Structure formats: C-alpha cells, structure tokens
Amino acid sequence: MALMLRCSMSFIGLVDTTKAQNPNYDEFPAQAHFSGPHKPACAAPLRAARATALPPGHEMAVSASAAATERLHGITGHDGGGGGGGGRVPVYVMLPLDTVSAAGVLARGRALNASLMALRGAGVEGVMVDVWWGLVEKDGPRRYNWDAYAELVQMVGRNGLKLQMVMSFHQCGGNVGDSCSIPLPPWVLEEISKDQDIVYTDKSGRRNPEYISLGCDTIPVLRGRTPIQVYSDYMRSFRDRFSDYLGNIIVEIQVGMGPCGELRYPSYPESNGTWRFPGIGEFQCYDKYMRASLRAAAVATGREEWGNSGPHDAGHYRQFPEETGFFRRDGTWNTDYGRFFLQWYSDALLAHGDRVLAAADSVFRGTGAKLSAKVAGIHWHYKTRSHAAELTAGYYNTRFHDGYIPIARLLARYGVILNFTCMEMRDEEQPAEAGCSPQCLVGQVRAAAAAAWAELAGENALERYDERAYGQVVETGRAESGLGLSAFTFLRMNKNLFEGENWRKFVAFVRSMNDGRKNVALPRCDSSHSDLYVGFVKGGDRKSSREMAETL
C-alpha cells in the first residue's frame, strides 16, 4: 500500500539581524574558504596544531599571513573525501524522547511502526533513540529492564532501518527541546540526597541533578561502585542483551558523557529560568570533589592560592561577556591565573571523556557497532575574544587557544565519531547582539576533526523544516566543501515532521543527502505540493499526514 501525505504550507520566521554590529565583537577578515553562497567572514588559524598532517586525500590550506596569527577561528577548506563516502550522507531521525514511557513500555506502538515505514520510504537510513539510565536501571543497582528497547529494536529491524542508540546517563528535562521528564534512577537520587556534592554545583551552591559530577568519577559514591563502573556495567548489560543486533541493526552506540548526552558541563540550564540565551553561563566546579581537584592542580603548579575557588569575577548565567571582569575583551581569562583555571577545567572534562570512552571501548570493541560522542554547538559569543559560553561549558576555545583539537584527538584515539550540533544554522539568522557564528564554529570543528583524523557526523540544534536550514546541512555535509559528514541525525520525529509541506521538504532533503547533490527535486507528481506519494507500505492502514500527526 502507498501512503499519500496531504501537504499544507508552513513558514518559519527568521531572526532580524539588521541591527548594528556590537562594538564589543571583533570583525573577522574573510580569509576562510567555504562552499556555497553564504560564506561567513571567519579568521584564519595559524596554531601549530592546525598543521597536523591530514590523512590521504585531505589537505588544509592555511594562510601564511603574519597578521592573522592573532585570529584563530576562521577555517580554511581542505579537499578530499570525508566520512560522507563519495558525497552521500545517510540520514537518521531522532525518535521522541518518550519513545519508551516512564512505565518502561514502548509508547504508541502502532503509530511508531507506521512512522518508521514512512521514514524508510523517504530514504532515511535509520533512527536514533535515547536509552535512558533512569528507566532501565530504575528498580535498583544492576536491575536492568531492556524489554521495551528490545521491542523497538525488532520493530526497527522489520522496517529495514538501522539504529543509533544513545547511552543516556543524564536526566531528561530542563533543557532546550526537552518535552518530558525522566530523572536519574531513584536509587541514584537517594545517594545524591545523602551527598549532594555528587552532582555539579555552581558558585552560588545551586545543585544540578542532570548528571553525576565528573569530580567523583573514580570514587565509589554509588553504593560501592564508582560512576564509571556503573556506566560500564550498564553498557555491558546492554551489549549482552542485544549482541545479536549489534553491527547489523544497531550500527552506532552514542556514549553520553554529560548533560543532554554531550561532553560538557551543565553551564546553561534552562530549568526554572536559571539561564536564558545568549547568557554566558557559569562554571560548574564547586562541589567538594571538583574543588579538591582544583586545589591539587594549584599546588602542583606552585600557586596554592589559585586553588581556593573558581573565578570571582565570572559573572552570572544571563550576563554578557563585557559585563564581567573575567570574560571581557582584556579580562582575567587571558592572565596567568585565567589560563591555569581554564586549562584545569577543560582538562578535567577531557579526562572524564577519556574514562567513559575507555569503558565503552572495552565493552563494545569487536561488536561491529561504531561508537560516537556528542559535542555541543555553543555558537553564541563566538565573535568575542574569550568565547565565554564555550569556556563555562568546558571548551577552552578562545581567540588564542583552540579548544576542539584536543576533543577531536581524544575521540580519534578510540575511533569514536565526533557528532556535532548546529549544522543547520547560518550566521545571518542569529541576533547581532549575541555575537553568534555557527558557521565559523562548524568550520573550526570540521578542521579539528580532519587534523585529528576523526570521523565527523552532525545534527541540527533546533527543530526546523525550512529549505534554508536543509540547504545549510546539505552544504555542510558535502565532502567537496571540506571534511564530509559520515551521517546526519535529524531532530526530531514528531507530528510536525509529517505535516504536509514539512514532510515534502524533508523527503527532498533526504534525497539530496543520499544523492550527494545540493538540490534534488521531487517527482513531477509531487510538484503541485498537494499529494506527496511515498511508495513504501507493503501492508497496513493508509494514513493521511493529518492522521499520522495526530497519532504521534
């Protein structure tokens, strides 16, 4: 049976960026090389790390201009095949956050199956799902319930799709796009109530229960086990339960390493209005375990006084860089103390990533499934010298220091895919006062991945269905515009995706990614934007896009 999806027009308004340039943001010389009609003016990097030899088929052009040595964040293009494999970039779609319900059952099974059939007919490679720690191990330590996920794996396989499964060791709720609440396992919350320093803490003493603090990675704070041991046991149980599917249906395991599953600190929590875009966020290093680590690092440096606390002048969550002593143009961030603190803070995050990835590698090595890790696309205040929002998240990325090459090298060491967000964004769409540059940021991360020989994949940061966003993803994913993407995961499957015009544009986008071409028109029978024909259903009910949307 075929599915006819009735289309209707939808529009997405873009940000008005006609405001005057903020004088606190530096102008970038247009020295970077980008494909496509929209080329942001990014500066040229000349750090020694950028000169790292690239694998065969990859070349990075680096400007030799001495005047560019101060400006580090414009990315020059390099030729050669990326992970995209001859230009094709397989597309995955994120399933709803509550695909498995709080009761531990597969939610809306019939609608989900129909949706998977539609995705398959559209040419989608597979789907991504969060495997929530808070659901699987909620009944007690080492008491795992994988039944709902086993049902999902079988359903996905029957529909001829692949699976990316996320080891989600964080809570759901309190961040951008969170549509449901899934806390950490109750027995973990009980341990947190006994020792609140188990979770990240800001300078005001505010505790964040999204994720266990990396400061206690190697301390047995979870009923005799360390957090790393708990994560390892969880992944090992998953591997044993799904061993028959790893490498064929389950092709990728994304390893969660922080809030939202990203390798970062929870520096910009939206819950209770704590943070609002484009605030700089706050450092999360005030639990007793992190403070002990800071003191030890300061003593080892010979400056014991630097270990008493984090920066006193770093401002508050919602402030702008120039409103603080630490992040302003010539602020504390660029002093000996600032460099010491930022290096310690980012090194601690990298060490956490190393520990978690080592555990994941030992569990999944030889299963045939690839590992991936998600890095946040923190693009606001990118045009400032300090890159404040990136710094509070743990990415030591400033005008004078590259924060992404160390991350890419860490992932490459374990053969882990670097999954980066904000692939759909254009600089011109962002509010001028926020100093955003998502395109330059993506370019920098792409160059870091190439230099480290790391595979690169992407996601969109926000839910969008317009052709401008799709076009930006296609442009970024093409190998001829730099290191190509090995895959792209679309956020997210919901009723909006299946609404007529949204669905038509999505199908065209998937075809563009599959064919490796910038624009792929739908067949003539679809050009009227009325009935979209998707010949994929072998049996079952015939649903309109409205009926499909209403069941999700």
Image: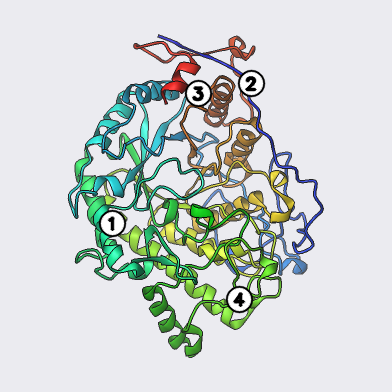
Q: Label 3 neighbourhood size at 10 Å, few (<14), some (14-19), many (20+)?
A: many
531 is higher (above) or lower (below) than 111: above
Give the quadrant of residue 403.
bottom right
Which badge, 4 or 3, is on the more N-terminal residue?
4
- Give the x, y percent position of residue 73: 66, 60
Q: How is the image coloured?
A: rainbow
Which residue lies most toward the front here?
272
Q: Earlier in the sequence, mark 4 or mark 2?
A: 2
Disc 4 + disc 1, Cβ < 8 Å: no
Disc 1 and disc 2 in contact, CB within 8 angstroms: no
Instruction: Say which residue label 2 marks.
Output: 9
Seen at 51% across and 39% down, the residue is 84
Nearest to the eye among marks 1 and 2: give it.
2
For disc 4, the marked residue is 313
- Which residue is more in the foreground, 331 or 154? 331
Query: Where 442 falls versus 336 (above or below)?
Result: above
Amino acid type indicated by mark 2: Met
Please tell me which residue lies in front, 40 or 415.
40
**For mark 3, what is the residue?**
498
Q: CA distance from mark 4 to mark 1?
A: 36 Å
Percent coordinates x, y for residue 62 in the rendering: 68, 59
Question: Can I make out residue 395 in this image?
Answer: no
Sequence-earlier tag: 1 or 2 = 2
Q: Is residue 51 above or below residue 173?
A: below
Mark 1 crowd level (few <14, some 14–19, many ≥20, 10 Å Cα): many
Q: Please tell me which of labels 2 and 3 falls first in the chain.
A: 2
**What's the distance in space between the residues labelled 4 and 3, CA to CA?**
48 Å
- Distance from label 4 to label 2 (Cα)? 49 Å
Q: CA distance from mark 1 to mark 2?
A: 45 Å
* Quadrant of image for the C terminus: top left
Quadrant in which the N terminus appears: top left
Dot 1 falls on a residue whose secondary structure is helix
